[in-house]
Image (tube, rainbow, N blue to C red):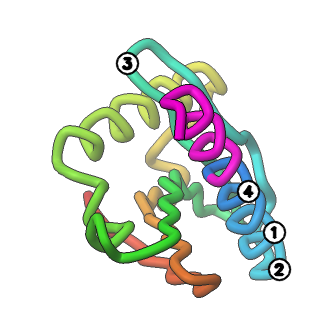
Amino acid sequence: MQESKRKLLNLLFGKKCEQIAAKYLQQKGYSILVRNFSYRGGEIDIIAKKDFKIVFIEVKGRNSSLFGNAKEAVNYKKQERIKEGAKLFMLKHNLNENEFEISFDVISIENNNIEWVENAFT
């Protein structure tokens, strides 16, 4: 398969996983504030809110376990980038982190199974 075609298929699969995760969160009573919040150095897939809780979510999808577990792909470097993006989001929207419970979560979608790891990292 051509490299560009493989990248496009991966991108489409990732977007589909993000849509599934957003719908899942809404079914759990969360409001989606932003999808694909971009900032210098990265992107946060989903930012959601419920009551006084703001959740910064990395969505990982896998078609197979050949390359490891989806949530294992959120390594320390990725975690640090998400935390930096969360700070920027809070500043940009004048949100005081002392007024909200903040959570960094991972939603993994593997073989049509959804696993939500709340407080995956701090």
Q: Residues within 10 Å of mark 1 (few under 14, many from 20)?
A: some
| Marks 4 and 1, the one that precedes in the sequence | 4
User: Considering the numbered disc 4 on the image, is that residue within a helix, a strand or a loop?
Assistant: helix
Could you say which disc has been placed on residue 27 in the image? 2
Q: Residue at x 27, y 70 (%)?
A: 68
| Marks 3 and 2, the one that precedes in the sequence | 2
User: Considering the numbered disc 3 on the image, is that residue within a helix, a strand or a loop?
Assistant: loop
| Marks 3 and 4, the one that precedes in the sequence | 4
User: Looking at the image, is mark 3 or mark 4 nearer the viewer?
Assistant: 4
Q: Are marks 2 and 1 in contact (CB under 8 Å)?
A: yes
Q: Residues within 10 Å of mark 2 (few under 14, many from 20)?
A: few
Disc 1 versus disc 3: distance between alpha carbons? 27 Å
User: Considering the numbered disc 2 on the image, is that residue within a helix, a strand or a loop?
Assistant: helix
Tag 1: amino acid:
Lys
Which residue is at the front of the view, 82 or 62? 62
- The answer to whether residue 64 is left or right of residue 83 is right
User: Considering the numbered disc 1 on the image, is that residue within a helix, a strand or a loop?
Assistant: helix
Disc 3 versus disc 2: distance between alpha carbons? 31 Å
Q: Residues within 10 Å of mark 3 (few under 14, many from 20)?
A: few
Could you say which disc has been placed on residue 16 in the image? 4
Q: Residue at x 53, y 58 (%)?
A: 59
- The answer to whether residue 114 is left or right of residue 23 is left
Disc 3 versus disc 4: distance between alpha carbons? 23 Å
Could you say which disc has been placed on residue 41 in the image? 3
| Residue assigned mark 1 | 23
Disc 2 versus disc 1: distance between alpha carbons? 6 Å
* Magenta highlight on residue 7: yes
Q: Which residues are magenta?
A: 1-13
- The answer to whether residue 38 is left or right of residue 119 is right
Q: Residue 41 lies in what quarter of the image?
A: top left
Residue found farthest to the bottom:
113
Q: Residue at x 45, y 36 (%)?
A: 86
